[in-house]
Image (cartoon, rainbow, N blue to C red):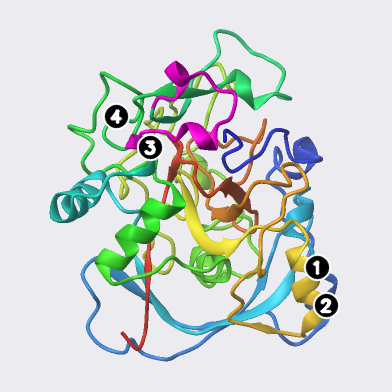
Amino acid sequence: MFAIGCGSAPPASSSESHAGHQVPPAPPEATSSIAVRIDDDPAPGPAPDGMVWIPGGTFWMGCEGCGMPDALPAHLVEVDGFWMDRAPVTNAEFQRFVAATGYVTVAERPLNAGDYPGVPKEMLVPGSAVFNPTAKPVPLDNHLQWWRYTPGASWKHPLGPGSGVRGKEDHPVVHVAFEDVSAYATWAGKRLPTEAEFEFAARGGLDRHLYPWGNDLTPQNKRVANTWQGQFPAADSGEDGYAGTSPVTAFPPNRFGLHDMGGNVWQWCADWYRPDYYGALAASSAVAQNPQGPADSFDPQEPGAAKRVLKGGSYLCTDQYCARYLVGSRGKSEVTSGASNLGFRLVRDARN
């Protein structure tokens, strides 16, 4: 339940791959004539409110040299054009959905004792996973030291009872499980992006760069995304202006005009998660066209848990532990779980 995005251990070779913010080596296939192609297809009409046209194209998907085996190998992918939300769905937008439909999120629903055999009834209280900074630096081999199941935590109360979203209407909604996101998408007439669509859009036309904005984590010594600064998980110094979530347009957009494609909150994708999927996809075709993800989920760390892919990283990401603001990296979450750093954005097909 608590392995949101990064899992329970630092990425392999993180000190070498991320701390210096080096450009990963080009994939072996990069000697071919294909690097990255952005189609010149115009938008198929006026932009839907709050959305940006993402032209189709071909790109290298994945993250060679990042020390993340599930993001290997880098492989060529082609996607068609689509509309994408300019920013993650906000608290205000989710509130309008709830007001219109009466929807109750997974985190707010009573728990069924049959789903939790052996758990005392008094402990079956609705809630969600909330990040809690530790009192001092700790070894980073057990994420349960800083994640806590918090009764009463939900999108309305992101840090638990007594907290709220007043004054944070323009922050991303959090504590949304996959079912919640799917319900919102149906109401909005949109859908979740595939993992390939998200990464293509996040790259903004840049070829095999580290981040949605380029190869420098802090271009011109400026913080351009909401990530962790300071000693993780004890103290976020907030050098970027925020400790926790930030308004969804607080930082500059990428070249496609999209905000928060790296940092702030993890974002759900439609694809099931398998760590070996990229290898299977690369072996199946020279260029994968509009891949939809594997047919089912499997995570050897939790074989019984059904998980979907997450992208983008969050305000908790740092090269000390989880550098998954790297644009080619991947995250994962069990479908019934939300967390205080997990949100979403949606897309719409061109024909709609």
Tell me which amino acid carries mark 2: Ala
Per the image, label 4 sits on a secondary structure element best described as: loop
Expressed as whole percent of the image width and height from the top left, the position of residue 113 reads 48, 31
Expressed as whole percent of the image width and height from the top left, the position of residue 257 reads 36, 65
Which residue occupies the foreground of this view, 301 or 91?
Answer: 301
Q: According to the image, label 1 marks what residue?
A: 279
User: Is residue 137 depicted above or below 66 in this figure?
Assistant: above
User: Is residue 253 depicted above or below 52 in this figure?
Assistant: above
Q: According to the image, label 2 marks what residue?
A: 283
Q: According to the image, label 3 marks what residue?
A: 107
Per the image, label 1 sits on a secondary structure element best described as: helix
Q: Residues within 10 Å of mark 1 (few under 14, many from 20)?
A: some
Of label 4 and label 3, which has the lower sequence position?
Answer: 3
Q: CA distance from mark 3 to mark 2?
A: 39 Å
Badge 4 vs badge 2, beta-carbon distance below 8 Å: no
Of label 4 and label 2, which has the lower sequence position?
Answer: 4
Per the image, label 3 sits on a secondary structure element best described as: helix
Do we see residue 86 in this rendering? no
Horizontal arrangement in the rendering, residue 133 relative to residue 232 (left or right): left
Q: Residues within 10 Å of mark 2 (few under 14, many from 20)?
A: few
Badge 2 vs badge 1, beta-carbon distance below 8 Å: yes
**Which label lies toward us, 3 or 2?**
3
Write down the region rendered in magenta: 108-125
Tell me which amino acid carries mark 4: His
Type of secondary structure dominating the magenta stretch:
loop
**Which label lies toward us, 4 or 3?**
3
